[in-house]
Image: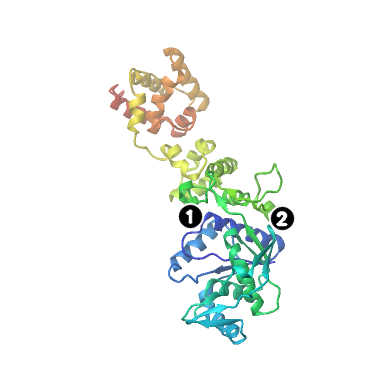
Amino acid sequence: MRLRFAPSPTGALHIGGARTALYNWLLARGSGGTLVLRLEDTDRERSTPENVEQIVEALGWLELDWDEGPVSQSERSDRHRAEIARLVEEGHAYEDEGAVRLRVPDAGSTTVRDEIRGEIAFEHAAITDFVIARSDGSPLYNLAVAVDDRDMGITHVVRGEDHLSNTPRQLMVLRALGDEPPPDYAHLPLLHGPDGKKLSKRHGAASVEELRDAGYLPEAVRNYLALLGWGYDAETTFFTTDELVERFSLDRVSRSPAVFDEQKLRWMNGRYLREMQPAELARRLEERHGRAGLRAAVEVSQEKLQTLADFWPTAGFVVERQPTDPRAWAKVMTGGAGDRLRLTRDALAALERFDVGGVESALRGVVDELGVKPKEVFQPLRVALTGGTVSPGIFESVVVLGREEALSRIDAALERVGGGAPS
C-alpha cells in the first residue's frame, strides 16, 4: 500500500486530521507499505511556513513518522502546469475567461467505490465544468491532488468524509490524465462533540497542540483516536501501538459520525498514567516543567493524576512551597484549628519513626485525643503543608516532605493563625 497524509497547512492540526494521519500510518505500517507526507498548499493566502512547522511538530509529538516527504504541492507547480496544458491540448479542458475548466460529460455518472461506504454514483448532470487552474495558470486543488496521487503511485486515499464530494471531480481528472486505475478510496466518518454537533473549540481541545499542552500522553491520544470510528471488538478498549498496527483495518471502520468526548480521553489518559513506571513519568514531567528531582512528588501523586497538567496543582507543594489559597484558609482555619494544629505539630515532632505508619498513628492519636472527626485534624494540616484542601494522602504528604520541612510549614501556619510558633 502507498498512502498519503495530505493536510492543508492553514492552521494547527485538527483532531480529525490527526485521526486521518493515524489511520493512514496504521495501514502503511501494518501492510509494510509507504506513507507520504504531502502538504496541500494550493490555498496560497492561508498556507504559511509556520503552519507547516506546526503540523510537522504535531505529527512528531504523536510519534507518527512518514517514509517520503514532506513534499508540498507548490513545489510541483511546473508539473501541474504541464498537465493542465496537455489536458487543454487533448480537448479534455478549455480556457474560459482565462481560467481553465475540465469538461464534464453531459450524461451518465461517475461512481466512487468507497471501502467504507460502498459505491456512490454522482450524476454528471449535477456537476458543471469545473475550474482546474486560475487565470494565472496556477492549479487548483482537484487538479493538483489528482496529478500528485497519480505521480506518487498512491494506491489508497484515506481521508475525511468532507472530501467525498471532491472525489468524483478528481476521478474525472484522473480519467482524463490516462488509463491507469485510480486509487482505492475510504472516507472516514466526521467527528462530533458529545452534543452531536461538528467538533469545534466549544467542545474543549480541538487540535493536537491543545491536547499536548493540556497534558495528554501521545500513546493515550493514539489509542483514543483509533477508536473514533473503528473498533476491533465490542470489549477491547486499550491497545498498544503494536496491537493497533497489527489489528487495524478499514473493514471495521464505521460510516456513522464518531463522538470525541474529552472526558473519556481524560479517563483513558489517567489509566495510562497510573500504569506508567514512576521513573518514566518523572522523566516526562521533568521535561515538561524544565526541572529535575520530581520523582518523590510523582510517587505520592501518580494515582491521582489524569493528565500531566494535573501534576503541579496536585503535587507541586512537594517541590516548593505553594501560595495558600485564601478560600481554603478561610474555610479550614477557623474555631480551634490553631489548637488542633499545635497538637498535631507536637505529635509529629515526637515521632521516632517518621514513615507513613508512624505518621498515621500519630495523627489518629490526635483525633482520638480530641474526640473530633478526622477532617478536623487533617484539613488544617493539609492547608499548612500544601496551601489547599486537596492533595495526595495526608500521611504520604507529610512523609514525602520530611520531618524538618513539614514542621517548618506547620510553624509558619501557626504564626499566621495566631497560635504562635514554638521556640
348 relative to 221, above or below: above
Position of the N terminus by quadrant: bottom right
Which circle marks residue 250 in the picture? Answer: none
The residue lying at 58 percent from left, 55 percent from top is: 19
Residue 97 at what x, y percent from top left? 47, 81
The residue lying at 51 percent from left, 65 percent from top is: 8
184 relative to 247, above or below: below
Instruction: Please tell me how many numbered marks the rendered image carries.
Output: 2
The residue pinned by badge 1 equals 209
Q: Tell which residue pokes out farthest to the bottom in this image.
A: 89
Regarding mark 1 in the picture, which secondary structure is present there? helix
The residue pinned by badge 2 equals 251
User: Quick one: label 1 or label 2, which is nearer the N terminus?
Assistant: 1
| Left or right of 160, for residue 329 | left
Regarding mark 2 in the picture, which secondary structure is present there? helix
Few, some or many C-alpha atoms within 10 Å of disc 1 (few <14, some 14-19, many ≥20)?
some
| Left or right of 47, for residue 3 | right
182 or 31, nearer to the observer: 182
47 relative to 218, above or below: below
Residue flagged by tag 2: what amino acid is it?
Asp
Tell me how far mark 1 sits from mark 2, CA to CA.
Answer: 30 Å
Residue flagged by tag 1: what amino acid is it?
Glu
Position of the C terminus by quadrant: top left
